[in-house]
Image (cartoon, rainbow, N blue to C red):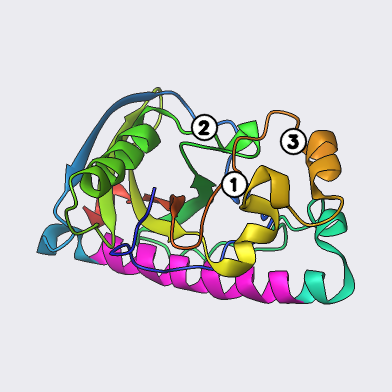
Amino acid sequence: MKARSCPVVLSVLAGLLLTSAGRADEPAVLTHAFFDPADPAVAEIRRLGEWTLDRAGVMMQAEVRRVLADSAPAMAIGVMHLKDYKLPVYAPGKPAVTGLRRTSLHVRNPANAPDAADRAALDRIKEQLDQGEPVAKILVQQVKQTGQPDVWRVYRPLVAMRQCLVCHGSAEALAPGVQDALKVFYPHDTAVNYQEGDWRGLMRVTIVVPATAK
């Protein structure tokens, strides 16, 4: 699925797995609603979300360069997890980032599978692409979860760049050893057969707003 109008935000390379930097066992989604990112009421949430996404993107690309400088793609698949990423420091009374993750309609790791709210965001981007409409640069969503305070999610699209195709390209043309490594680490992988410029999925920041900040 081509995404030429989609913002090229991050270079997501072979097997780069962004696990949640917050809680891995997120509560079930009850309801979700999208907000206009230009709405002044969500300006602080959007600003924090975009800043966090920008910071994570820089760290991801640095990790890719560092790991691949010392390892072949097949060896790197199991180690590029952005596991050292630290969430922004919480400021009392201010919105706080509680999680960062990546998801897609075609995941490599089942842990990155979308929940209901993620799926709604993915479907929104897919519909824009299918209709030939401009793709949203950012999505802002409010989510209600079981037994938890309401949270906000800020999403940004990801696209496949040329270097991503070493491990996400045609299944028949992956870098040497990659298919074998994928069978070991991700036996149910569906994140292959992309072409340069294809839409890959979404990066998501989760934000909680204290009651005093509302």
Residue 60: in magenta span? yes
- Residue 129, given in percent of the width and then of the height, sits at 26, 49
Tell me the quarter of the picture where residue 16 sits. Answer: bottom right
Picture layout, residue 55 above or below residue 19? below
Mark 3 closeness class: few <14, some 14–19, many ≥20 residues within 10 Å: some
Mark 2 closeness class: few <14, some 14–19, many ≥20 residues within 10 Å: few
Q: Residue at x 31, y 41 (%)?
A: 121
Task: For marks 2 and 3, give the one nearer the viewer.
Answer: 3
Circle 3 sits on which residue?
186
Mark nearer the N terminus (3 vs 1): 1
Q: What secondary structure is the stretch in magenta mostly built from?
A: helix
Q: Residue at x 45, y 56 (%)?
A: 97
For the residues labelled 3 and 1, the Cα–Cα distance comes to 17 Å
What's the amino acid at mark 1?
A: Ser
Mark nearer the N terminus (2 vs 1): 1
Label 3 residue SS: loop
What's the amino acid at mark 2?
A: Glu
Circle 1 sits on which residue?
20
Q: Which is more toward the observer, 198 or 206?
A: 198
- Residue 173, given in percent of the width and then of the height, sits at 71, 52
From which residue to which does the magenta span run? Answer: 44-65
Picture layout, residue 94 above or below residue 212? below
Label 1 residue SS: loop
Q: Residue at x 29, y 46 (%)?
A: 125
Task: For marks 3 and 1, give the one nearer the viewer.
Answer: 3
- Residue 164, given in percent of the width and then of the height, sits at 61, 61
Circle 2 sits on which residue?
26
- Residue 10, given in percent of the width and then of the height, sits at 50, 68
